Amino acid sequence: DKCADTSTRKIATEILDYRDDSSVIVKELSEGHPSVDEVEAGLTLLLALAAAQEAREEGGSATTPLRHFQEVYQMEDVPRNVIDGEMRPKIEWYRNECADESARKVAAEILDYRDDSSVVVRELREGGRQPSVEEVEAGLKTLLELAVAKEAREGGSAATPLAHFGEVYRSEDVPRDVIDGEMRPQIERYRDESADESTRKIAAEILDYRDDSSVIVKELSGAQRSDEEVNTGLMVLLELAEAQEAREGGSSTTALSHFKEVCEMDGVSYGIVDAAMRSRIEKLGDDSSDDAARAAAKDVLRHLNEAELRDVKAFVEQHEEEIKKHIGSVASKLPMPVMFSSKDKDAGSRKKMSLYFECCDKVEGCLYPGRAPKKAFVSESTEINKWLQVAVAAVLVDVSIGDQNDLKGVGAVKKAWESAQDAYDGSFKDFVSQSFLDDAEQETLVEQLKGIDFYDQFKYWASKGGWRCAVCHQKEVIEKKKIERSVPPPLDIPPPQSAPATEESRAKSDSSEGVLVMGMIERRSGGMAKKWKKQLVKVLFSEQAKQIVYDDPQNPKKHGVIELRDVEAVAKEKRGTYKQEYVFSVTTAKKTYYFATRHVNDIDTWVSVISGCLERIGG
């Protein structure tokens, strides 16, 4: 600048021009494939050159370095957010405050390129290739960032970036749930809070597309669809239903209706809707405050149940004779439980289930007239699958004869079967088709029932094909013999063959109609030893004898008699009395007798019968 020698000034100028020639940086970065770090360093240097040239007092301009900056920034593979750190505020200064109009214009072009959402759309569609889900997600996030940036500017609007967002999102093969993470709340904010009406409208359209269950139906309506695709579609519809139900004033009605529409498509089996999905549908129906949604949930479940019944009926039609033959051979050996319940009881590593049996006659005084625990004969078993097979076989017979309650029966057994699914594999249809116990399996259940004295409490009623309690059975015997008696006679247990009776006891009990209850139970003996001893005990109630008789089967000479007219009270004692579980006492003026049974059902029977006799005598 100051040297008097022209040659010197010229050479110095050439040196500085070389130093300040921004085109050199462009040339260096254009060779090969520079890394992002190299590009960022080059852009930073170009901004420094622009600042230096702008700072010169005479004729300085940042235009040329900024133009070269633009050239590098718009090169292929240069990420557009590379300027979003320290560089962007400097470029914004050139656009807003630089005195040089050409520099302002170039800076504006750079920022417009950075904020041009159409570039994202173009990049994702470039070359006609199908971008990956990761690329689409990254592009959508970039578009949301642009929307945020544009809306933040004074008078700015997110409408254009959001419109491009919707364009990308609705592209073929873009999964609709791709926005369900961090993006959805941002779009919901635009829909609900943006001051710009266009922005609110576009955001609403994006969310409507996301939540439009009809799209799933349309996608699955094609001829070519796999079970996996159907299952995925149904899961999405359930998620949509739950999401819509969770919104204030929302309703799952439409999504559930579309769920049913998919289930009704040709080739879609009801079995594709597993227990977990059914449970979610039931919850939607139970929890919804919208009558239409509750009705839609019930409609879906009704369709699934009816489809299941049709499948079961088809199986029955193919195997009707085989089913009837099987249940005919089993019915007289094994009763069908009227109810199952599972309360996460474990027997070691095996699940345990409660079985409820009821009398099929239910006359006055019936011991087990209903399903409630106190009105049913209750047992627990780890042989869940076998008992369910007994129940299924019985239900299938009802289905074969068109019983009106067949659907209810299938549903009840299926519900019990589902509760045992952690122990057994396969579908319910498979289970139904294999519901035939072989002889060994039947015998396992018979032995289990013997162990809890079931066959002492119930008798098979051949004419009705069911099981009735001993009271109802005994009443029919009495009526047939035209013997009037007001005391309901429970348990009729024949004495063991090895239990001889004395002449005295035979004289008093030969008439079977006089025996109300009889069985081998334990009696606590008197004397110093006071031991429990198993004896044959009978309650007699007839014109000839009203007594409790206890005989020692090992010694016919040893027997005792308690006259019922001398009995003051009969009562169940506290569990554990004299180290026995089920103890009842018979009290006379002179002595209290103690008896122990093996099962809670037995003690109820003995106390009930003796109490009835005392009421009869007292009356």
Image: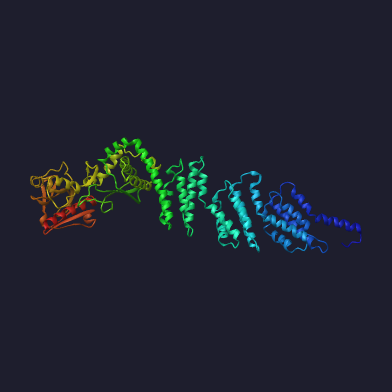
Quarter of the C terminus within the rendering: bottom left
Is 195 in front, or is 482? 195
Residue 128, image x, y percentages: 64, 44
Is 540 in front, or is 113? 113
Residue 89, image x, y percentages: 70, 61
Q: Is residue 441 above or below residue 244?
A: above
Image colouring: rainbow
Number of numbered callouts drawn: 0
Residue 233, image x, y percentages: 49, 47
Q: At 33% from the left edge and 46% from the top edge, which residue is drawn?
A: 409
Is 240 in front, or is 573? 240
Q: At 72% from the left edge and 63% from the top edge, which residue is drawn?
A: 96
Residue 396, image x, y percentages: 32, 41
Which residue is most to the right? Answer: 5
Left/right of residue 246 with respect to residue 75 in the rendered view? left
Quarter of the N terminus within the rendering: bottom right
Left/right of residue 337 with respect to residue 304 in the rendered view? left
Q: Is residue 541 visible?
A: yes
Q: Is residue 537 visible?
A: no
